[in-house]
């Protein structure tokens, strides 16, 4: 990042804040209002510091004149901006940063679920005999697959030449039936399935 982000931020804030003199007072006018967006690609610039390649946008709002800017999560952290709590109260910077991280994680998860859903839909067109409707419905409900089911889906996706990232697919190992399936996997299946497992799941299974 260029050293000029602070100069750029001062310029923006002077333009959009009520106070025009003191940088800290200007910053105090702004808070994260809880609205965040995923652009699906790093294609925008932060409206505060000008940093390019922003994928996740967070809305900061001015409490005096109600101006809004779409910024990267970094700017909220770096400038110790406040936020807004569940009951409409202003929150301290530390708490706000936690919320930004939480919202960012949520956007990342939603994007991942959307990619999986797209794969399943593509497969339903390529292989209508699989009757994917039920799988899609179940996935939208649970967001995870059983080990054997996910391997079956990978097989069919490969067969249908649908591009996918196995790491997007998450596996549930909570039910006994799901745990039992793990013991029945062949080595190559386990190798493929490992890409779907969380670090905690791998530790539990002794795969780390
Ligand atoms: Zn920024």
Image (tube, rainbow, N blue to C red):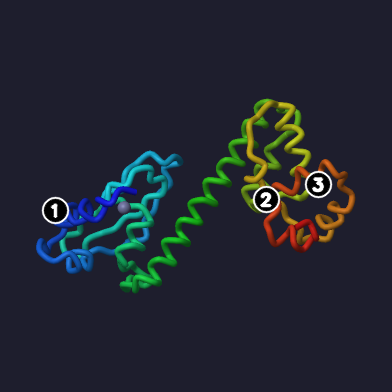
Between disc 2 and disc 3, whose residue precedes? 2
**Residue shown at 85% from the left, 52% from the top:** 181
Lateral position of residue 12 relative to residue 149, left or right? left
- As drawn, the label of residue 1 is none
As measured in the structure, the alpha-carbon distance from the residue carrying label 2 to the one carrying label 3 is 14 Å
Q: Quadrant of residue 60?
A: bottom left
Residue on which disc 1 sits = 15
Residue on which disc 3 sits = 190
**Residue shown at 40% from the left, 71% from the top:** 95
Q: Looking at the image, do the residues carrying marks 3 and 1 touch, with CB atoms under 8 Å apart?
A: no
Q: Residues within 10 Å of mark 2 (few under 14, many from 20)?
A: many
Residue on which disc 2 sits = 170
Residue 108 against residue 77 in the figure, above or below: above
**Residue shown at 83% from the left, 41% from the top:** 188
Q: Secondary structure at mark 1?
A: helix
Q: Quadrant of residue 18?
A: bottom left
**Image quarter hosting the C terminus:** bottom right
Residue 135 against residue 144 in the figure, above or below: above
Between disc 2 and disc 1, whose residue precedes? 1
Q: Secondary structure at mark 2?
A: loop
Lateral position of residue 104 relative to residue 69, left or right? right
């Amino acid at each position: 990042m260029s050293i000029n982000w602070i100069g750029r931020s001062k310029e923006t804030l002077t333009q959009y804040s009520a106070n025009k003199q003191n940088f800290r007072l200007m910053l105090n006018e702004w808070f994260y209002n809880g609205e965040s967006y995923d652009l699906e690609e790093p294609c925008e610039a932060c409206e505060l510091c000008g940093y390019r390649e922003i994928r996740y946008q967070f809305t900061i709002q001015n409490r005096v004149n109600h101006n809004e800017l779409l910024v990267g999560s970094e700017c909220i952290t770096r400038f110790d901006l406040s936020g807004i709590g569940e009951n409409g109260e202003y929150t301290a910077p530390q708490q706000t940063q936690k919320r930004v991280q939480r919202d960012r994680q949520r956007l990342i998860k939603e994007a991942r679920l959307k990619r999986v859903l797209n794969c399943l839909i593509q497969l339903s067109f390529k292989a209508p005999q699989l009757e994917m409707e039920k799988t899609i419905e179940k996935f939208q409900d649970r967001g995870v697959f059983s080990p054997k089911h996910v391997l079956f889906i990978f097989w069919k996706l490969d067969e249908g030449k649908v591009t996918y990232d196995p790491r997007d697919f998450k596996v549930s190992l909570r039910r006994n039936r799901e745990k039992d399936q793990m013991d029945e996997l062949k080595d190559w299946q386990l190798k493929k399935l490992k890409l779907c497992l969380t670090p905690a799941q791998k530790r539990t299974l002794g795969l780390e």
